[in-house]
Image (cartoon, rainbow, N blue to C red):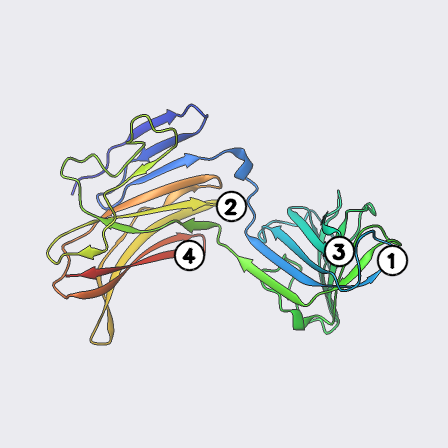
Amino acid sequence: MTANKFFTQITMPFSSAFRRLAAFALMGAAVMALSAATARAQNTQVTIEGTITSVASLPGVSVGDKYSMVLYYNPTQAPASTSGTTANYTGFTLNAVVDDKDGNQNFSAEPGAQLGVDDAPANNSFFLPTSCNCPTGAVFELVDTTGTAFKTNALPTALTLKDFNTAVVEFGNIGSNATGNITSLRVLDTGGIIPAFITAGAPDPNGKVPTINGVSGAGVFNLDVSFPLTLLSHGSSYVYTLPFQNINFTGTCQASFTLTQIQYNKTVTLDSGKGSVISGCNPTTFWFWTFNGKAIADYPGPATLTGTVTYGSSKATTTTTVVIQ
């Protein structure tokens, strides 16, 4: 095995760049900076759904209409301000649609509104209050008077509807608005780093792949790897490639892989590898590692190839099934 060579930074026509990093024999890595538009990526999605229960005078909206509200935020953000037991947050987006008789009507968080979390004893709440009384504004409130829903006033990464004895939404101006109940509350969390895939491929005897931007004339940034294989021959060795993208994590990260198989009801590790720790693992970057595997053991049957990225105290994994012959 030979260590990967170091490549100097190359500036792309669209002002992005990548580096091929020097590393030990089992690891290769590349990183490219994305556009600034992704720098505020958020990784918790809260979907609130229900039915309009009362209407003052919001045109087109009637009792019984269905609505859907989607809230996005980064749960690791620090509060913009605090007041007593309440923490207020500004890094979020909220959009809602009411399916009324005249067609869908769109609503959103009001300008300047702040998302609030209160962990006061006997009065936990998660809410978005009104800030300008706008005709297209949307607000919500979840209240738990037992005080057991939240342990802190950090933004939640899990919510259970039955934990709240008050759960309401409102759309439009105060006095001419529509109020709805909440019948469904779903939370989807995605990690700060997400691995795209892991694949096994034949080693290139000419040393051309894996590489970055190996396709001459291509109009997009590309990763070029040996054709992904799922049928592996015992006695042969393969190159394992693990690309991933950093969504909103800042810190150190490290990639690793394992090839495991069930043998006589026990999980056996056939091969594994770990990359060096990367200190500049920042938002808006993506990377890939390559690992030169050892010869495949002579034990035919299915096996699992797993790629793992460890970042901070978290881990993200991706798996693929291969068959050994």
| Along the line of sight, the residue nearer the viewer: 80 or 42 | 42
Task: In the rendered view, tell whether residue 125 sits above or below residue 283.
Answer: below
What residue sits right under mark 2 in the picture?
Answer: 248
> Residue 31, image x and y in percent?
38, 37
Q: Residues within 10 Å of mark 4 (few under 14, many from 20)?
A: some
* Residue 14 on image: x %, y %: 45, 26
Secondary structure under tag 3 reads: loop
The reply to whether callout 4 and callout 1 are in contact (CB within 8 Å) is no
Give residue 56's mark. Answer: 1
- Tell whether 48 sits left or right of 33: right
- Does residue 138 appear to the left or right of 294 in the view shown? right
| Foreground tag (2 vs 1) | 1
User: Which numbered mark, 4 or 1, is in the foreground of this view?
Assistant: 1
> Which residue lies at the image location 27% right of the left edge and 40% below the top edge?
23
Marks 4/1: CA–CA distance: 49 Å
Q: Residue furthest right?
A: 175
Q: Which mark is residue 315?
A: 4
| Marking on residue 232 | none
Residue 111 in sight in this render: yes
Q: Quadrant of the C terminus?
A: bottom left
Whichever of labels 2 and 4 marks the residue nearer the N terminus, that label is 2
